[in-house]
Image: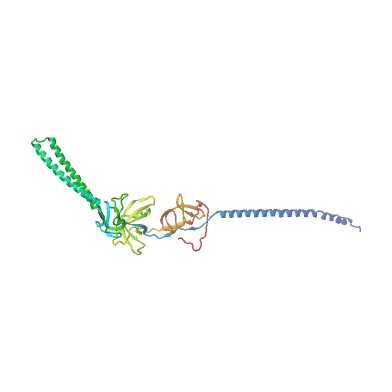
Amino acid sequence: MPVQTPTATTQHNDRPSDQGPAPAGRGKILVGAVLLVLITAGVVTFLNRSSEADALAKETEAVSVPTVAVVQPQTEPGNDELVLPGNLQAFEESPIFARTNGYLLRWYKDIGSKVQKGELLAAIDTPEVDQELSQARATREQVKSALELAKISADRWANLRKSDSVSQQEADQQASGYQQGQANLAAAEANVRRLEQLESFKNVYAPFSGVLTRRNVDPGALINSGAGATGKELFDIARVDPLRVYVSVPQAYAPSMKVGVKAVVTLQEFPGQKFTGVIARTADAIDPATRTLNTEVDVPNKDGKLLPGSFGQVHFATGTSVSRITIPVNAMLFRAEGPQAAVVDKDGKVHLQPISIGRDFGATLEILGGLDVSNQIVINPADSLEEGQKVHVAKPKAGDAHS
């Protein structure tokens, strides 16, 4: 049988062809793997850096947005009683000056004395006025004597003129002398009356019923008449029944202040006691500086329990019980635009809302307009807070309450 050499030859030729390309393919695979690793590492690094940049931007944005504490306006039940501070003053008050010069002889009433109209308060020694009055009276008697002689002469010359014993000019001169004497007598009598009036001022009387609140002189003190630079008041007298109570009523309640409306006055030194009065008059004009109406309440004070100059609370029945809104006093902004409140909306943006303020209760303020009970108001707002600014609302702490 013939030997099949081609088969062996074929097998010999195929072995080198299978082993030749193996190293080149492995290198390509290795290079591709390395490139894939580098690309993956670059992508991961880029993504990490982008994520860090986004996180930093978000953190920066979060830090730039301020965090504020907010509170909602409180609704308080309405009260048909308006309570305002008032100043008690005497119904009439006047200093008493001397109308003549001299020395204080004695005083009859001291401070705290209740006096009636026309009652004697003091006596003044007026030696100079006394001497002037005596001289004036003597001068008047001289003028009277001269007038009688002038009358006799005028009558005599008038009779002589009828018989043509004297000229008409001489008769007229005597008649004129008599008329001049009458004028001199009138002047002398006027001077006497003036000095008599000054003499009457040596006794000082009460001009009206009241109480003496001050005495400024003692016996022997030099007294100068009048209220000028040299004059000195002797007494101060005040009428304390009734008393005037002056109240500054806010403009919002001015329409309720009518003459005849009753008011109640209370004082701290008389707890539980009420003194009833009525509105006697108002200024009928709002003070532009305070936006209030000056109102006078007259209160009877027969027993003198109320003292002029005291401070009290005046209660008015306003006839309205509308609920009022109040906010903490530290929630208000003072700016050139007027009083404002910083309101935070549902999107976390600030809106500067103008407000109208009513009464000041110390820790809280009454708001007449500009806010609603649903508003969120910033407490202790910063001066840099602006309209439309984004803010974070802080969570309320336990124990926080509207004060």
Residue 160 percent coordinates (x, y): 9, 38
In which quadrant of the rendered image does the C terminus lie?
bottom left
Q: Viewer-proximal residue, 167 or 232?
A: 167
Question: What is the residue that sits farthest to the bottom in this orientation?
Answer: 272
Query: Residue 369 falls in which quadrant of the image?
Result: bottom left
Q: Viewer-proximal residue, 335 or 371?
A: 335
Question: What is the residue that sits farthest to the left in this orientation?
Answer: 163
In which quadrant of the rendered image does the N terminus lie?
bottom right
User: Is residue 96 something that shows in the picture?
Assistant: no
Question: What is the residue that sits farthest to the right in this orientation?
Answer: 1
Q: Viewer-proximal residue, 64 or 126?
A: 126
For residue 274, above or below residue 286? below
Q: How many marks?
A: 0
Q: Looking at the image, what colour scheme do you see? A: rainbow
Judge from the rendering whether residue 366 lies leftward or rightward of residue 161; answer left or right: right
User: Is residue 114 something that shows in the picture?
Assistant: yes
Query: Residue 301 falls in which quadrant of the image?
Result: bottom left
Residue 113 percent coordinates (x, y): 28, 60
Q: Viewer-proximal residue, 164 or 328?
A: 164
Q: Residue at x 19, y 48 (%)?
A: 138
Residue 164 percent coordinates (x, y): 9, 35
Residue 56 percent coordinates (x, y): 61, 54
For residue 304, above or below residue 352? below
Q: Residue at x 18, y 45 (%)?
A: 186
